[in-house]
Amino acid sequence: MTSRLNCSLFSLTFVSVLPAILLTWLHAAAAADKAISIPVQITHAQNFDPFPSPDGKKLVFISLITGKEQLFTMDADGSNVAQLTRDDADHEDPAWSPDGTKIAFVLITKNHHSIAVMGTDGSNVEVLTPREQNTIHPNWSADSKRVIYCTNDDLQPPKKNSADINAVDLVTKKITRLITGGINTYGSWSPDMKHIAFRKIIGDENSEVFVAEGDGSNPRNLTKNPFFDGWPAWSPDARKIAFASNRRGHGYQIFVMDPGWRQSAATCEYGRPWNSAAMVSRRESDLLYKLR
């Protein structure tokens, strides 16, 4: 089982709560000035890694079933739960396509990680990456024609290895290398496709949020902080980036960078999570985050 599952199990003990999907309502133009609402738990099992549908009405997520990570969908209020995968494999990092027709995910068989896509009902599973690549963290292009992903940086944990960020065309299966050199993970295109946000690990003690042009050129460090910053997510208007950081020194919190890349807290620490990650919904006033 992967490190993400270990993180989830650790948080169960450390926080004494089950992993939950938490919705924080904040106004995009004045997030720092508005009070943070109370999170609402909508699942009561070992569920993690939620990702919203383009219209924000449904979520795809992982649920641990008889020792395997299976993918499910549900309405945003927790109702109408449907199981999508039932095979003897693990499934991680689900990501809903912008056109609403497909879900990308990591298919794990015998410790090998591949990027795959399927219909939103679990049908027509298709592996996109070649066997010689060990791949993780899929995300989508704005036109839903390509999937951006990275090679696995955890081949020999706990030591990190170099990882590239690539993109694969769904029709031709052509793979394009976008970011290389060092440990680069969690890549995502901005909604206008002009930039790529990603996490780069620097040395043994530092992780930063970087941004590059849409073709991977001109990478630059946005966070420049000695603590761990990472897991970036774009706002729907491409003007903000949400990310997780432990810079406050007591667990991870969610932060938002404005167009001038000034950092401001988007939400306060909740329950001292071991790890957290941000996800911005298609509606610009919502910030979805998860505790792991």
Image: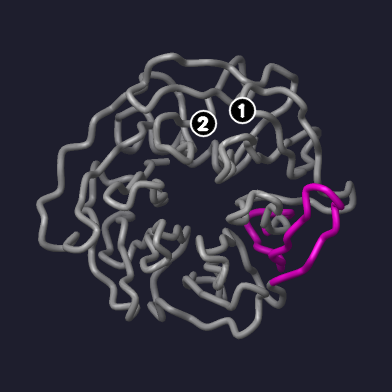
Q: Is residue 20 left or right of residue 39?
A: right
Look at the image and say whether residue 87 sits in the magenta stretch: no
x 23%, y 63%: residue: 265
Tag in front: 2 or 1: 1
- The residue nearer to you, when weighing 46 against 188, is 188
From the top left corner, tell me how far across and down residue 162 is, in percent.
Answer: 71, 68
Region in magenta = 153-178
Which numbered disc, 2 or 1, marks the residue that appears first in the sequence?
2
Q: Residues within 10 Å of mark 1 (few under 14, many from 20)?
A: some
Mark 2 sits on what residue?
A: 60
Spatial CA span between label 2 and label 1: 9 Å
Mark 1 sits on what residue?
A: 120
**Cβ–Cβ below 8 Å for labels 2 and 1?**
yes
Q: How is the image coloured?
A: one colour
x 31%, y 64%: residue: 256
| Magenta part, dominant SS | loop
Give residue 288's quadrant in the image: top left
Q: Is residue 267 left or right of residue 12?
A: left
